[in-house]
Amino acid sequence: MRLRHDPAAAPFVAAHERVLLENDAPAWRGKWRSLFGREQDAPLHLEIGIGRGRFILKSCEARPEVCFLGLELRAEMVMQAIERVKELPENLYLLQLNAQLLPELFTPGEIDVIYINFPDPWPKTKHAKRRLTAPEFLQLYKQVLRDDGEIRFKTDNEELFNWSLLTFEQQGFRLCDVDHDLSEEDSGVITEYEKRFRTKGQPIYYACAVNSV
Ligand SMILES: C[S@@+](CC[C@H](N)C(=O)[O-])C[C@H]1O[C@@H](n2cnc3c(N)ncnc32)[C@H](O)[C@@H]1O
């Protein structure tokens, strides 16, 4: 996603009361539900790479009972997500940091569902480790997802999709739902990228991968 560096973004998100950065987010490890003022059995869902935030903001509206965390590397994106709404929903906190830090942020099994929507495909083999469905990332997700917790993955990129189906299985996830042409009705909340690809008539690929013990 092309977005120019904006020197105002980092200070803006650092000062926002509903954004946590890599220095303060680990303090909530094992206690995320209490940050939301919810019971310990409340569902906790994490989206990795929220971009401009369409999916997570709409998901918060659709599922008020869920505690949502939206993780994003770039401050510019987080700022744009915040600017979409007057106020962030009470069931949302944003984390501006790298997904590589997940085990420092969550205790084993703390998360119920992880969403990965239209991640950068990194088509060159030498960049494969940067794909959010690379084995290295899947091992991090495995550490923080509960047993039988789910990764819900959408992409427009067939090569990335097929490669990811293999990495899910190789890393101990069970595929429970695979769709090579996900309909709009079955898609649930539509992401910003998804909206663009659907307008162009491109197929959307979807997989749900379960953390098998
Ligand atoms: C192509 S955009 C997709 C945005 C959104 N999910 C959508 O479907 O519209 C991918 C996003 O993932 C973020 N991202 C990439 N690698 C990341 C990482 N290691 N940790 C956190 N966010 C990451 C990027 O900054 C970018 O905003």
Image: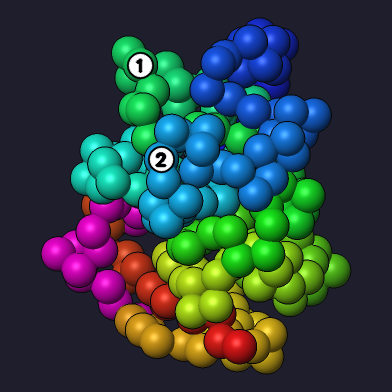
Q: Examine the structure image and report whether residue 100 is included in the region drawn in magenta.
A: no
For discs 1 and 2, the disc positioned in front in the rendered view = 2
Q: Quadrant of residue 122?
A: bottom right
Seen from this angle, which residue lies furthest right? Answer: 126
Answer yes or no: do the residues labelled 1 and 2 have beta carbons within 8 Å? Answer: no
Would you say 186 lies left or right of 90 here?
left
x, y percent for residue 2 = 59, 35
Q: Is residue 191 magenta?
A: yes
Front in this rendered view, residue 92 or 129:
92
Q: CA distance from mark 1 to mark 2?
A: 20 Å
Residue that label 2 marks: 38
Task: State the image coordinates of residue 51 (x, y, percent, origin top left).
Answer: 51, 39
Q: Which residues are magenta?
A: 180-197
The residue tagged with tag 1: helix, strand or loop? loop
Using residue 209 as the reference point, say whether residue 76 is left or right of it.
Answer: right
- Name the kind of residue labelled 2 in the image: Arg
- Disc 1 marks a residue whose amino acid type is Glu
Q: Which residue is mark 1?
A: 87
Q: Earlier in the sequence, mark 1 or mark 2?
A: 2
Provide residue 15's location: percent of width, then percent of height: 63, 10
